[in-house]
């Protein structure tokens, strides 16, 4: 499949036609494996592949490890069922890879490389995969904090959304038009993204973060991050929902729940949700460790 960027097109219908034609041309025969997280990008890619190739020629591949939040795992299964694409869980062990556990700014490379290696070595032949694709979109291609893209290149993983020029806005618009249930789902980076770079990633930390974020989301917030700073949990929620924390009973509920998850101190970040909070400053400074 070509990796030359294509100018974005207007309208969900024209993007749908472009994407379906692109997939059919890229894979005239054989089965496509989609590295699938349950987020809107990979879900839309699965939906497009089902329309282009037929459900029997598409397989959603969900990486399962300590870095996958339990709620995201459940939602990924429900979304795949809604789309009508079969799903296989791929057990990965990136936590055993030094480059991942050390948690440098390129941590995501080791995570994606582990997934694509397992697919290549264990699943491609088993499931008759002619190619593997993942949900990079045109906006992702322009971001400097996406080391996982290097792993995709090394493993010859296809990027249909980016190659068709599909921006995040267009991805969401097409997902709505097709009735994909996660069309408006906020981005949900893996749990390791809550650990500051240079602080080793461990299963214990990831489980603590997972439990703490469940507490925040159960309190009714539409999105949340719990950043792990040793004994301190730094909660991020959408800026327009910060006012809810004026309620003393809600604050008490969060403090009790997050402490029960294993943190000693519970703080709130007044800046709200921050994508790339740990990685972008290092990339901007030209640091990779």
Image (spheres, rainbow, N blue to C red):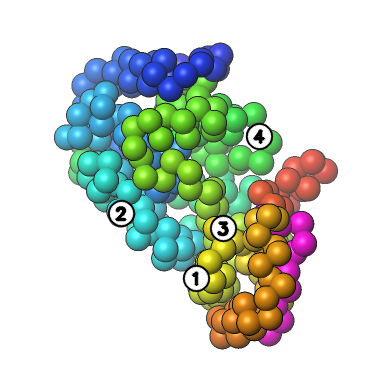
Q: Nearer the viewer, mark 3 or mark 2?
A: 3
Alpha-carbon distance for marks 3 and 2?
20 Å
Residue identifier under label 4: 143
Q: Say which label, 4 or 3, has the lower sequence index.
A: 4
Alpha-carbon distance for marks 1 and 3?
10 Å
Q: Position of residue 38 (x, y in %)?
A: 40, 48
Residue furthest out toward the left: 56
Q: Position of residue 79 (x, y in %)?
A: 32, 48
Q: Which mark is residue 77?
A: 2
Q: Compared with residue 28, is residue 229 higher up or lower down, i.e. above or below?
A: below
Alpha-carbon distance for marks 4 and 1?
32 Å
Query: What are the residue bounds of the magenta stretch?
Result: 262-273
- Report the front residue among 119 and 134: 134
Residue identifier under label 3: 223
- Report the front residue among 235 and 232: 235
Alpha-carbon distance for marks 4 and 2?
28 Å
- Report the front residue among 18 and 220: 220
Report the residue at 64% width, 29% height from top: 142
Q: Nearer the viewer, mark 4 or mark 3?
A: 3
Secondary structure found at label 1: helix
Q: Main secondary structure of the magenta part?
A: loop
Query: Dot 2, how many residues are within 10 Å of its Cα: few (below 14), some (14-19), or many (20+)?
Result: some
Secondary structure found at label 3: loop
* Pointer 1 with pointer 2, Cβ within 8 A: no
């Amino acid at each position: 499949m070509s990796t030359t960027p294509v100018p974005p097109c207007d309208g969900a219908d024209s993007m749908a036609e472009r994407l379906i034609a692109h997939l059919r041309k890229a894979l005239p025969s054989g089965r496509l494996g989609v590295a699938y997280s349950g987020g809107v990008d990979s879900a839309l890619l699965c939906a497009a592949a089902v329309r282009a190739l037929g459900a029997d020629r598409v397989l959603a591949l969900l990486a399962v490890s300590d870095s996958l939040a339990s709620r995201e795992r459940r939602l990924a299964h429900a979304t795949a069922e809604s789309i009508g694409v079969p799903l296989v869980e791929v057990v990965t062990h990136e936590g055993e890879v030094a480059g991942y556990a050390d948690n440098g700014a390129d941590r995501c490379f080791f995570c994606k490389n582990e997934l694509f290696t397992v697919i290549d070595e264990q699943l491609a032949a088993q499931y008759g995969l002619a190619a593997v694709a993942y949900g990079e979109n045109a906006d992702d291609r322009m971001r400097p904090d996406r080391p996982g893209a290097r792993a995709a290149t090394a493993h010859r993983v296809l990027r249909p959304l980016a190659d068709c020029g599909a921006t995040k806005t267009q991805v969401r618009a097409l997902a709505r038009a097709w009735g994909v249930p996660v069309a408006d789902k906020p981005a949900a980076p893996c749990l390791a993204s809550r650990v500051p770079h240079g602080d080793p990633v461990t299963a214990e930390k990831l489980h603590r973060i997972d439990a703490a974020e469940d507490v925040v989301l159960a309190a009714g917030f539409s999105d949340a991050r719990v950043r792990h700073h040793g004994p301190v949990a730094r909660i991020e929620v959408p800026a327009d929902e910060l006012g809810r924390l004026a309620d003393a009973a809600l604050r008490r509920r969060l403090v009790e729940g997050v402490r029960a998850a294993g943190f000693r101190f519970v703080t709130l970040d007044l800046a709200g949700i921050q994508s790339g909070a740990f990685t972008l400053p290092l990339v901007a400074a030209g640091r990779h460790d």
